[in-house]
Every structure is written in C-alpha cells, then in structure tokens.
Amino acid sequence: MVKTPIDRAALTKKALAAVRAEPGCESVKIVSITTVTVVNDGSTDWHLQVTDPGEADMDSAHHAANRVKDALTAQFDLSDA
C-alpha cells in the first residue's frame, strides 16, 4: 500500500480530529507529533502524544492516541520529518 505524504500541520489536525472522535476523548485540546529516529535502521518515524487532554481521562486519551497513530501510520508518511 502506498502511503500519502503529509506535512506535520495537516497530520496534527487529522490526529486531533481522530482522537476527539474516540469515546470519552471529545474534549482533548492539544496533540503533538514528534519525529523519532529508529535506532536499529536509522529510518525516521513519528510519535503522537496528547499534550492537553482537556476534561478527558489522560489514560483513555493516551490509548486513543495509540490507536489513532496506528491507523494514521498505515495511511500517511510525515513529509517534513
């Protein structure tokens, strides 16, 4: 499957919308995308973190972010890594 290149701002917007769509996470205010380097092979990847959960339970928001990251990773490559 070919992944679509996406810039950080657009990916952050998609990720926030997807996290907010998760049950109990409607009030999440801010997510951030961090570029990471995979040590074993030197490739780059990205990490999704909820930085302001709003009124959402932080544990629920964290699990939602993991699900969203998995889904978005299958679709997009961060173009400004």
Image: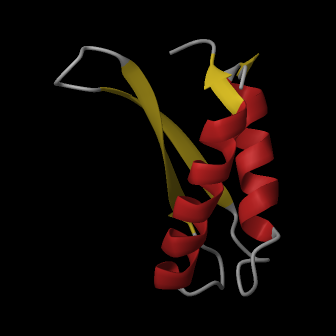
Left or right, 12 with reference to 26: left
Residue 62 x, y percent position in the rendering: 49, 70
Residue at left offset 43%, top offset 28%: 45
Asked if 72 appears above or below 41 in the picture, the reply is below
Asked if 61 appears above or below 14 in the picture, the reply is below
Count of residue discs: 0
List the single residue furthest toward the front.
1
Residue at left offset 71%, top offset 78%: 25
Residue 38 x, y percent position in the rendering: 27, 26
> As rendered, which of 42 and 60 lies closer to the eye?
42
Residue at left offset 60%, top offset 39%: 73
List the single residue furthest toward the left.
40
Colour scheme of the rendered structure: secondary structure
Left or right, 2 with reference to 57: right
> As rendered, which of 76 and 6 lies closer to the eye?
76
Left or right, 55 with reference to 50: right
Q: Quadrant of residue 17?
A: bottom right
Asked if 71 appears above or below 33 in the picture, the reply is below
Asked if 47 appears above or below 31 in the picture, the reply is above
Q: Quadrant of residue 5?
A: top right
Residue 20 x, y percent position in the rendering: 78, 68
Q: Specify the quadrant that holds the N terminus.
A: top right
